[in-house]
Amino acid sequence: MRIISGIQPTGQLHIGNYLGAIKQWTELQNKEECIFFIADLHSLTVPYEPKELQNNILEAAIAYLAAGIDPSKSIFFVQSKVKEHTELTWILNSVCPVGDLERMIQFKEKAKQFKKNINAGLLTYPTLMAADILLYKAESVPVGKDQVQHIELAREIARRFNQRYGKTFPEPKPLLSEGAKIMSLTDPKKKMSKSSGPEGCLFLFDEPETIRKKIMSAVTDTGKEVKFSARTKPGISNLLIVYSLISGKKVKELEGEFKNKNYSEFKKSLAEALVNFLEPFRNKKRELVSRKIYIDEILRMGANKARSLAESTMQEVSSKTGLM
Ligand code: TYM
């Protein structure tokens, strides 16, 4: 099975990105054919600082590698270095109804958030995402819950293209993990996201003191019992999911372990577990920061491999659409 996924280079990765997406990727790369990329073209659709973009891409590459993406097992590259992504986007734009794009929750949210910059890229963002996936004829896309609607649209676009031009693309499916929606530490009713405030995010490379501080001050619920209930105890439930995913223990097991303990004891234990869990990430990052040439080479080789797959799909697409 061919797997594909990407992350935007918009600053530091948080544990939502890790538990929702990258953790699955590191497991999948041992058994499937995996392609992972840094979605720099997507990041142009919201306000950003051009001078900082290259550095953000490098930071994202370091984060991927530190979190366990192995370039000897997966194809790993920067999206804009394979021009076929934008080429296929145009063709897919021509089979995608505008109404479908206008329905996208992320488009509506971003249009509200960036009222002064509702650019066409913000609207056609999902066709670029569909191109990312279909270009490699990927069947499965490991993502967090917030991206599911986009993958469903990619399925619909594949279906429409196949109907119009003949069977070309498989219909991709989202692959969700138990960490598909990690909530904010400061507002557990909202998903963890940089755009809703860095205080609510636990970043992959946060130092131990910051981790302890953020977990100890994470918003919890009234009551004392460490028990899972997404509806009545969203704060504790979110922390239980994080604890479960990083420790490999089931939520029920953790509830038993903290049965006669209070929130503070639970949080202290979780903070220490996170400090230990994230230590290898911090160490690996420190090691990679001084190896820019090595990282550039990995990305260059990855782009070459990706390009050769992409070129072959584009030949087929050009031929079927009458462009060749
Ligand atoms: P991005 O960069 O916003 O997020 C990267 C991945 O992290 C997941 N994620 C979360 N998972 C669980 N809990 C959270 N709080 C949380 N926040 C983020 C996202 O679901 C995502 O899997 N459009 C995509 C990037 C992209 C892409 C693609 C993905 C571009 N092309 C093609 C798959 C296939 C995005 O902006 O993700």
Image (spheres, rainbow, N blue to C red):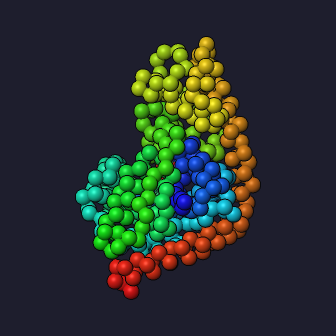
Residue 133 shows in the view: yes
* On screen, residue 267 above or below 48: above
**Residue 51 visible at all:** no
The C terminus, quarter of image: bottom left
Check the image and report above or below for 317 versus 237: below
Q: Is residue 262 left or right of residue 88?
A: right
Residue drawn at the location 71% of the way across and 37% of the way down:
276
Which percent across, then down, holds residue 90? 36, 72
Residue 48 picture location, percent across and down: 46, 59
The residue drawn where x is 44% and y is 45% is 145
Locate the N terminus by quadrant: bottom right
Would you place residue 157 above or below residue 201 in this image? below
Q: Quadrant of residue 95?
A: bottom left
Q: Residue furthest front?
A: 167
Looking at this view, is 3 or 300 the one in front?
Answer: 3
Farthest left residue in view: 99
Number of residue marks: 0
Residue at the image position 58 percent from the left and 60 percent from the top: 34
Image quadrant assignment for residue 127: bottom left
Q: Residue furthest top?
A: 260
Q: Where does the image place residue 144, in percent across and percent down from the top left?
A: 48, 47
Q: Position of residue 219 (x, y in %)?
A: 50, 27
In the depicted view, which residue is nearer to us: 202 or 301? 301
Q: Residue at x 63, y 42 (%)?
A: 206
